[in-house]
């Protein structure tokens, strides 16, 4: 049984971007969706605002897909490993953690393989504003994880590394978003300058960040400055995405999940 620091949300509320389409429909239409994407190859010269395939490497290895039960259950959101004294913490969007008991994390997932294994959630941290009313300004969450299978004795951060968490970013900070659309078996990446949609919500213009990219890290340099989510569950169209600003509440939640003092 997964420990939650706050009560489970009531059933029947609207689902956000991550679960809008059924997994069956996504499986049937995946080939058509792939043929419809015109993505350049990733590279150092990828222009701002252009989405490309994310190359394998240390950065992509710290980001993974969230699955329902296992690799055959379909991936529906994205998460990333963040630094903590326990070396066992991931960050994602709060709306991605409706069913933590059956959710597993596959860092570095690519082409149907989980090179760093599967990790089960052991404790979930969501803010009171999300639990009480799904406040989009509180659509940030953290969870501790442990190996899902026998044989792995290390913590996830010791396996793949981790991103530091950084708040107080300028309104126009340039970030890199890295995440997994539900119809793809490899991550996409896009970098661009952000803007403040409101004092509590940040937006970015990047194409093709469709369902499944909820929870994707927004990296300012090598630090987590947000996760894809918030307003409209992260955005109603794949060309524009949102993130709740990593303010005092989000940082307090991170410190609680990491077990550190602010």
Image: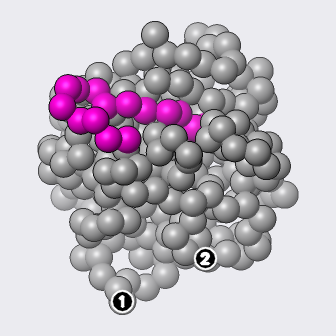
The foreground one among 72 and 158 is 158
Of the numbered discs 1 and 2, the one sitting upstream in the chain is 1
How many neighbours does mark 2 have within 10 angstroms: few (below 14), some (14-19), or many (20 or more)? some
> Where is residue 246 drawn, in percent x and y?
72, 54
Mark 1–mark 2 Cα distance, whole angstroms, equals 15 Å
Q: Which mark is residue 45?
A: 1
Question: Against 199, is 57 above or below?
Answer: below
Q: Residue at x 51, y 41 (%)?
A: 86
User: Position of 200 compared to 41: left or right?
Assistant: right
Q: Residue at x 52, y 70 (%)?
A: 222
Number of numbered discs: 2
> Where is residue 105 drawn, in percent x and y?
35, 37
Question: Against 68, is 173 above or below?
Answer: below
User: Position of 194 compared to 129: left or right?
Assistant: left
**Which segment did they paint magenta?**
141-155
For mark 1, give the secondary structure: loop
Q: Residue at x 29, y 76 (%)?
A: 42
> Where is residue 193 drawn, in percent x and y?
61, 76
Q: Which residue is mark 2?
A: 174
**Magenta stretch: includes residue 144:** yes
Q: Which mark is residue 8?
A: none
> Is there any visible trace of residue 25 in the rendered image?
no
How many neighbours does mark 1 have within 10 angstroms: few (below 14), some (14-19), or many (20 or more)? few
């Amino acid at each position: 049984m997964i420990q939650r620091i706050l009560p489970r949300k009531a059933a029947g509320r609207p689902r956000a971007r991550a679960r809008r389409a059924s997994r069956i429909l996504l499986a049937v239409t995946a080939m058509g969706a792939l043929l419809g994407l015109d993505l350049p190859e990733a590279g150092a010269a990828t222009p701002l605002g252009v989405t490309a395939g994310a190359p394998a490497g240390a950065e992509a290895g710290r980001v993974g897909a969230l699955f329902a039960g296992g690799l055959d259950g379909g991936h529906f959101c994205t998460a990333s490993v963040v630094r903590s004294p326990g070396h066992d913490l991931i960050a994602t969007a709060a709306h991605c953690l409706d069913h933590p008991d059956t959710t597993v994390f596959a860092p570095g997932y690519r082409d149907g393989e989980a090179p760093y294994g599967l990790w089960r959630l052991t404790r979930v941290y969501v803010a009171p504003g999300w639990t009480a009313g799904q406040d989009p300004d509180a659509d940030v969450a953290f969870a501790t994880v442990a190996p899902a299978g026998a044989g792995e004795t290390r913590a996830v951060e010791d396996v793949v590394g981790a991103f530091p968490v950084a708040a107080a970013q300028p309104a126009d900070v340039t970030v890199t978003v890295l995440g997994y659309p539900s119809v793809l078996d490899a991550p996409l990446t896009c970098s661009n300058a952000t803007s403040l949609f409101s004092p509590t919500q940040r937006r970015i213009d990047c194409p093709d960040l469709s369902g499944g990219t909820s929870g994707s890290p927004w990296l300012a340099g090598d630090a987590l400055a947000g996760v894809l989510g918030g307003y409209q569950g992260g955005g109603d169209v794949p060309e524009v995405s949102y993130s709740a600003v990593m303010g005092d509440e989000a940082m307090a939640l991170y410190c609680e999940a990491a077990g550190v003092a602010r």
